[in-house]
Image (tube, rainbow, N blue to C red):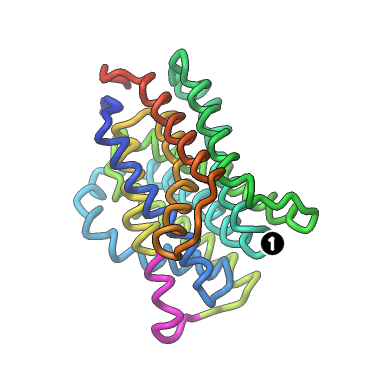
């Protein structure tokens, strides 16, 4: 089996930050979609398949039946993440949803240690803790610990588990396949799971007109075709633990969107939170030398 050498180079950390920037735009399009949450997720994945096919076509020839099934299963887990995350916006605040869905390191780090024997550098956990503290400081003023939000909070936290499983599966399969192959094949699992769920829970919904289509196309391009695809590519270059911490920059980028696009004012607390997150990610990255890691 071909094993990709993960050098954890800074350029791939920056490339993953670009992927996270596209993923951070997802919440905007979910809010703008007039379709129900699961149907929105279904069309996001469905529209991505013809766009990913030209990128994945050559790599599909080396797929084994076993890996097709594994990728299909990975897609089902991604569908769980998409459905739960989209639904959470209907039952809790945006800040709560963004915080809880970004807790994937709590699953990724211990599982990768026991399952993949991923080594944890000396000060990695300290850097991870600093990053998480920064996220709490950044979002703390907007978090709503209300009983009415508990169900939505549960959905968002559950989404983080489903996404963590998807990350772990795609991370391992990046040893053999390009990211476009992973996203294309897993997309069939996601589309089937989301399609069946949407029909059973929300009924058949077909988007009509530009007003309904453009948020779905925005989700397709920003999340499925560019964001997740680019993130999966970086998983072939970075340790899964380092990658999961870099993903915690998503609330930082979402806050910057709010400032630059929607002219929202950043409080001193939010600026401090952003600075702490950046310091934490820098500390985590500093633990990984440029030595080749498997």
* Left or right of residue 2: residue 35: right
Task: Report helix, strand or loop for mark 1.
Answer: loop
Occupied quadrant, residue 43 = bottom left
Q: Number of marks in the image?
A: 1
Q: Quadrant of the C terminus?
A: top left
Residue 1 in the magenta stretch? The answer is: no
* Left or right of residue 181: residue 147: right
Residue nearer the viewer, 5 or 53: 5
Q: In which quarter of the image is the N terminus?
A: top left
- Location of residue 104 in the rendering, given as x and y in whole percent from the top left corner: 54, 39
Residue found at x 44% / y 41%: 247
- Location of residue 266 in the rendering, given as x and y in whole percent from the top left corner: 50, 52
Occupied quadrant, residue 49 = bottom left
Q: Which residue ends up furthest to the top in the rendered image?
A: 122
Residue found at x 57% / y 44%: 160
State which region is magenta. 206-219
Q: Is residue 1 above or below residue 17?
A: above
Task: Kindly report the secondary structure that dominates the magenta region of the rendered protein.
Answer: helix
- Location of residue 106 in the rendering, given as x and y in whole percent from the top left corner: 58, 32
Residue found at x 36% / y 21%: 286
Residue picked out by circle 1:
91
Q: Which residue ends up furthest to the left in the rendered image?
A: 58
């Amino acid at each position: 089996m071909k094993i990709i050498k993960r050098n954890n180079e800074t350029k791939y950390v920056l490339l993953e930050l670009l992927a996270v920037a596209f993923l951070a735009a997802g919440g905007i399009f979910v809010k703008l979609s007039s379709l129900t949450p699961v149907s929105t997720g279904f069309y996001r994945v469905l529209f991505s398949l013809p766009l990913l096919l030209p990128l994945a076509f050559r790599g599909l020839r080396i797929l084994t039946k076993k890996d097709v099934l594994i990728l299909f299963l990975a897609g089902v887990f991604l569908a769980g993440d998409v459905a739960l995350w989209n639904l959470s916006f209907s039952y809790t605040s945006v800040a709560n949803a963004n915080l809880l869905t970004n807790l994937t390191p709590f699953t990724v780090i211990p599982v990768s240690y026991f399952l993949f024997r991923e080594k944890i550098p000396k000060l990695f956990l300290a850097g991870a803790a600093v990053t998480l503290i920064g996220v709490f400081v950044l979002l703390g003023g907007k978090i709503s610990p209300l009983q009415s939000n508990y169900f939505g909070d549960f959905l968002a936290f559950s989404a983080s588990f489903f996404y963590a499983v998807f990350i772990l599966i795609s991370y391992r399969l990046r040893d053999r396949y390009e990211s476009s192959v992973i996203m294309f094949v897993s997309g069939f699992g996601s589309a089937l799971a989301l399609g069946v769920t949407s029909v059973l829970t929300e009924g058949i919904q077909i988007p009509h007109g530009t007003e309904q289509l453009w948020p779905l196309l925005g989700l397709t391009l920003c999340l499925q075709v560019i964001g997740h695809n680019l993130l999966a590519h970086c998983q072939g270059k970075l340790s899964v633990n380092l990658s999961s911490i870099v993903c915690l920059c998503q609330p930082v980028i979402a806050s910057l969107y709010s400032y630059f696009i929607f002219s929202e004012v950043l409080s001193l607390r939010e600026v401090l939170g952003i600075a702490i997150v950046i310091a934490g990610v820098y500390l985590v990255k500093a633990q990984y030398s440029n030595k080749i890691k498997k």
